[in-house]
Image: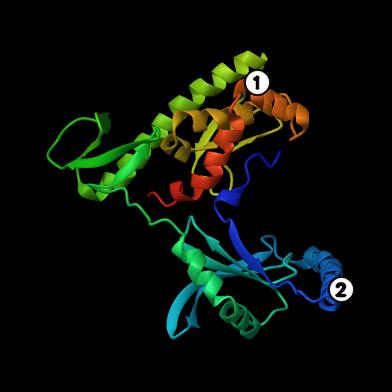
Amino acid sequence: MPPALSGAEIRVMAVEDRPDHPFEKARFALKVCAMSFLHSLLRRSASPAGKSEATQPFRLNGETVDILVRRHDRAVRIKLSVDAAKGMPVLTLPRHVSDREGQAFVEKNAGWLRSAMARVPDAIPLSHGSIVPVRGTDTRIDHRPDGRGVTRIDGDALIVTGDAAHTARRVTDFLKRQARADLTAGVREKAAILGRTAGRITVRDTRTRWGSCAANGDLSFSWRLILTPPEILDYVVSHEVAHLVHMDHSPAFWRTVARLDPDYEDHRDWLYRNGSALHRIG
């Protein structure tokens, strides 16, 4: 399976434990090579997942900050990042690194962390009064507890009836159905242009990819694409349908994408800039 669309738009902010002095850089490079070799041996006896994670409180400048700490068999250096989808910092540690070293690294980069967290979009709940983009158009969730009928869009309102406790689920189900309809139609149209037939189409809540194409032609997409303007969804469809011809990201692949979406570079850039905010909805 090709890497399709990366999760860079979800977790683009990160700092790593890299030295600056030339001598230290050389020592660091040797250490990384040694650790990589050692880890390749250790992974043979590692657990299937190869990693563990837990949320831990860290003290920073007198405040307590919850950080998701991940210990990974394949990690060779300390890394601090911000997962915009979860709205929290993530500290990745190699197995051999102590909690104290992790704490020191976080303290060293406290300023960067505060700045990065300030750029994380606010979460938007799927509840009455919230504004969510549907096909790129701001739409207000209008919960009508005594109303009747299915969840639907009426003008600039997304109308939901029934018990308020089920509003989020009903809105999500509605958006997934809309996404599936738009994606299915788009795949059929683009595949026909290339003279190909797509396999099964799956709609999920993926966090690291907007779409993917399996070797057997099955396609998978994030339902959150229904939150983007139509041309952005069209780009992702074009990207994955192009993989029905080229299972790589070669120049020929990108020429095929351009055939299906001449403005794909602009649309790809939009998704990179705005993608993380979509994962803060719901």
Secondary element at tag 2: helix
Task: Work out whether residue 235 can be spotted.
Answer: yes
- Above or below — where is 172 with respect to 64? above
Residue 279: x %, y % from top left: 46, 49
Question: Counting residues from the N terminus, which is met first, the one under dot 2 or under dot 1?
Answer: 2
- Above or below — where is 171 with respect to 191? below
Residue 148: x %, y % from top left: 16, 32
Query: Where on the picture, by quarter, is residue 42?
Result: bottom right
What residue type is disc 2 on?
Answer: Ala
Residue 121: x %, y % from top left: 42, 56
Q: Quadrant of the N terminus?
A: top right
Residue named by callout 1: 259
Residue 26's label in the rendered image is 2
Crowding at dot 2, Cα within 10 Å, few <14 / some 14-19 / many 20+, comes out as few
The reply, left or right, for residue 33 in relation to residue 92 is right
Q: Name the foreground residue: 17 vs 3.
A: 17
Task: Work out whether residue 200 can be spotted.
Answer: no
The reply, left or right, for residue 267 in relation to residue 197 is left
Query: Most extreme residue toward the front, as rendered?
Result: 21
What residue type is disc 1 on?
Answer: Arg
